[in-house]
Image (spheres, helix red, strand yellow):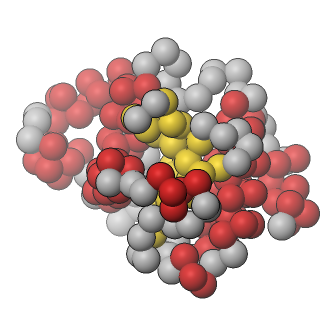
Amino acid sequence: MLTDIAPLLLDAASPREASRRTLDWLLLHTRARSIALWRVEGDEITLDISVGADADTLVCARSMWARRDPAALAAGRPLTDASAVLAVTRPSDMLVYVDGVDPKAVDLESLVDGAAVAAVALRRSPSGIGVPGNSAAALRREELVATLRLHEWNIARVARVKGVTRKTIYDWLARYDIPREHVPK
């Protein structure tokens, strides 16, 4: 598996980009809807990076973590039948969440190994993990980007969904340094 993703890592402009490319590859390899890496801090988890995740997926991952079975997680077993939440063994304080995949049909060991590669690359990023110094901001940023992608970057629609004004969405784009994407019609 590592030989498959080696070109992705070597061609990446930064460690964070290498991590994102590795997650993209894992997403294709598992045929999942989304994949995310979470950092474990005590009983809490903080989103570090995700591909294909929307706000509902992120909320679902948090609720699954709250209801987790520590014995299943320690044994490397997924927490549900419709998605996999697995401990990444190196570094040991990371989780990989894969949504929309049958854990019985996926090579979980390769999935964990690939997630470990992405986690190590992410930790070597000069900007650190997530938004520097504020893990809550990193989660809000990822949720906003996921919602924008879900609604094809339609600011008015996202504002209605979030229950705020369009100006607030533009303010959030500036605050979290999210470049505006235009989706061709």
Quadrant assignment for the C terminus? bottom left
Relative height, residue 51 to residue 40 (above, below): below
The answer to whether residue 177 is visible is no
**Residue visible at 39% across and 54% down?**
68
Quarter where residue 86 is shown: bottom right
Relative height, residue 55 to residue 29 (above, below): above
Q: Nearer the viewer, residue 70 or 30?
A: 70
Q: Position of residue 6 (x, y in %)?
A: 87, 56
**Residue visible at 49% across and 15% down?**
133
Q: In this rendering, would 153 be left or right of 91?
A: left
Quadrant assignment for the N terminus? bottom right
Q: Position of residue 17 (x, y in %)?
A: 69, 42
Q: Nearer the viewer, residue 66 or 164?
A: 66
Q: In this rendering, would 3 be left or right of 163?
A: right
Residue lying farthest to the front in this orientation: 71
Quarter where residue 57 is shown: bottom left
Q: Nearer the viewer, residue 184 or 70?
A: 70
Q: In this rendering, would 112 be left or right of 181?
A: right
Q: Position of residue 179 (x, y in %)?
A: 45, 35
Residue lying farthest to the right in this orientation: 3
Residue lying farthest to the bottom in this orientation: 105
**Residue visible at 47% across and 52% down?**
70
Residue lying farthest to the top in this orientation: 133
Counting every numbered tag in the picture gives 0
Quarter where residue 142 is shown: top left
**Residue visible at 16% across and 36% down?**
166
Q: Position of residue 128 (x, y in %)?
A: 63, 23
